[in-house]
Amino acid sequence: MKTHPLSPERCGATKLEAEEILFAATVAMELAKPDLPEWKRACMNNYVRCKEEEWSGSCYDCFRSCEGQRGNWPRDKCRRKTGDD
């Protein structure tokens, strides 16, 4: 990615994968800000958990929805997988 930032496929990643990696890095930088509103911090923390724990649904879309709702994570669309999912 560092060598070919505009051509992620040359590094074995799709453009979507590269966008998700860069977005995750942006989220990490934002979480480090001390003046971040608590509702936005909650959305970001849920996004990180969604990605790390491989929740069902689109983590990115749910993050954007959470931002629009100022902290209300759409649990009907993105949540932990249960059972053998």
Image (cartoon, grey):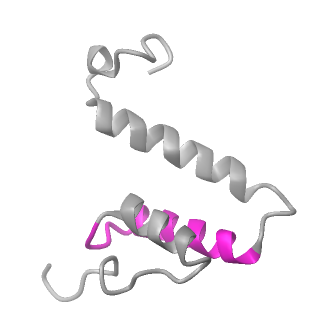
Residue 47 position in % (x across, y down): 49, 66
> Which quadrant holds residue 40?
bottom right
> Which quadrant holds residue 80?
bottom left
Instruction: Kindly report the secondary structure that dominates the magenta region of the rendered protein.
Output: helix
The residue shown at (31%, 86%) is: 76
**Closer to the camera in the image, 77 or 13:** 77
Please state if 26 lies on the left or on the right of 85 as rendered.
right
Residue 23 position in % (x across, y down): 51, 45
Residue 11 position in % (x across, y down): 32, 18
The residue shown at (30%, 38%) is: 16
Quarter of the N terminus within the rendering: top left
Residue 59 position in % (x across, y down): 38, 64
Please state if 46 lies on the left or on the right of 13 as rendered.
right
The residue shown at (81%, 56%) is: 33
19 in the magenta segment? no
Please state the extent of the stretch shown in magenta in the rendering.
38-57
Above or below: residue 71 compared with residue 34: below
The residue shown at (45%, 70%) is: 65
Quarter of the C terminus within the rendering: bottom left
Q: Outermost residue, right direction?
A: 35
Q: Outermost residue, front direction?
A: 68
**Closer to the camera in the image, 22 or 69:** 69
